Image (tube, rainbow, N blue to C red):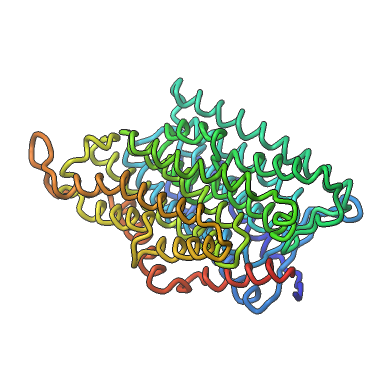
Amino acid sequence: METISSIKPLGAVLVSLIAAMLILVTGDRHRNLRETWTLLAAVIKFSLVFSLVGPVLEGRSVETTLLTLVPGLKLQLRVDAFGLVFGLLASGLWVLTSIYSVGYMRSLQEHAQTRYFFCFALALSATMGIAFSANLLTLYIFYEILTLSTWPLVAHKETPEALAAGRKYLVYTLTSSTLILFSAAAIFVQTGTLDFTPGGFLAGRVAEGMLPLLFALLLFGFGVKAAIMPIHEWLPSAMIAPTPVSALLHAVAVVKAGVFGCLRVILYVFGPALLIQKGLWFPFALLVSFTILAAGMIALGEDNLKRRLAFSTINSLSIIILGALLRSKSGITGGILHLANHGFLKITLFFCAGAIYVKTHKELVSQLDGIGKQMPLTMAAFTIGAMGLAGIPPINGFISKWYLCLGALEAHEMIFLVVFLLSALLDVAFLFPIVYNAFFKDARGKPPHFDEAPRAMLVPLMITALVSVILGIYPDAFLRFFSLAAMAVQNILGGG
């Protein structure tokens, strides 16, 4: 693969960092200008990331070297097909989340809005660094920055409950990061490199007795943000945060960064061949399968809408990891595609939850009877998100779940095919009653009248719902997710 040097990956990281400084300087005195920096940075970031699609699909990787620490170890950004899928998802959804955030924060007259937009911009800089990290050390550094920049967002409301959720988030994520750092140091000592390599680079270079330990430490290290059970509890607790933060946590950055890290470890550090040879994949496949089914069943009993969606996210994240652990062409393809498709679906659902809260201050599923008559556009978008997560065509979730099921068949692992199918049934069970009650039950008390959320909130959720439909009909539309996923899989299974 040809490598070209470019400042674009660094520019994608720095643009929102510069915006964060401008947001801080502008402050509450000129809030229109403050929000302009946010929106301008989001558009520029997405444009930079999108401009990398052509070179990558032509078979080139794009690099920026920041610093050489010692021979074989650099702070370096490198854009490959897999990283570009994550980069496109995060930068594209940030544009819509920024517009939505302005409508949400102003409608509720939230406090500390400058801090909110400042931290949001920092988080997106860190996310781009994670997406484009060339090695495990660079990924670790940006991973830590993401943790610290999102902590004030989790604790934004500053209530005792919010502060407790923020502390829990820090304890879980900072503790897990030490596992990543220890593992990276051990790998570098034995191999002299930490560079991500399609198909992995550890085979024959690390003492065999160390491989199970390193695999466990790295997957649990990244698995905290990916909310693998039993290290998941920070995520439902973090639902105390404002809804745009929940969207950031679930669809744009934080949990996706955890899943992205897990897939980098599985596919670019260890590699499918080594995982099969040493039998490392199976215990973790069982663990994420347990997470998939347990999270779905817990979601059934959650009355708080955001907490139900949180457990739905836990379910979906482990589906992505399981696809990669199956080591088959279709399984890995489905996992990478679901990383992107789930982002659009889940952000749609959280946008809808926020719109409902802004207009009605309702947070419980049991309060949503008849809401579809008051907010038909919002609930139509919610229906699309629910159908997509359940894998119903023609929504984009069907494509990725189809490939995941094919992956289980290719790997001759029928037990995991059953897991995927049961997961889809659980999605139906905990999401479709919300849709049915919204449209076919009458609201209690005074009959509702048409009253949607402000346009700054309504338009983004309608766009994400529409894109979910288009990507279900034409998976390679707009952002070329399908082509990028196919290229990534070819590189991984071909070893380069």
User: Which residue: 39% across, 42% down?
Assistant: 309
- Along the line of sight, the residue nearer the viewer: 440 or 461: 440
Q: For the view shown, which residue lies furthest in the top direction?
A: 160
Q: Is residue 166 visible?
A: yes
Query: With respect to residue 433, does 404 lie above or below?
Result: below
Q: Where is residue 206 in the image (x, y as percent from the top left)?
A: 85, 50
Number of numbered discs overlaid on the protein picture: 0
197 to the left or right of 311: right
Query: With respect to residue 420, does 407 lie above or below?
Result: below
Query: With respect to residue 23, does 414 lie above or below?
Result: below
Residue 361 in which image quadrant: top left
Residue 152 in which image quadrant: top right
- Along the line of sight, the residue nearer the viewer: 303 or 380: 303
Q: Is residue 44 visible?
A: no
User: Which residue: 32% across, 48% down?
Assistant: 352
Q: Position of residue 165 (x, y in %)?
A: 50, 27
327 to the left or right of 252: right
Quadrant where the C terminus is found in the figure: bottom right
User: Which residue: 72% across, 35% down?
Assistant: 178
- Along the line of sight, the residue nearer the viewer: 288 or 56: 288
Q: For the view shown, which residue lies furthest in the right direction?
A: 71
Q: Where is residue 132 in the image (x, y as percent from the top left)?
A: 67, 58
Q: Where is residue 246 in the image (x, y as percent from the top left)?
A: 44, 42
Residue 255 in which image quadrant: top right
395 to the left or right of 206: left
- Along the line of sight, the residue nearer the viewer: 163 or 311: 311
Quadrant where the N terminus is found in the figure: bottom right
Q: For the view shown, which residue lies furthest in the bottom direction?
A: 58
Query: With respect to residue 368, does 459 lie above or below?
Result: below
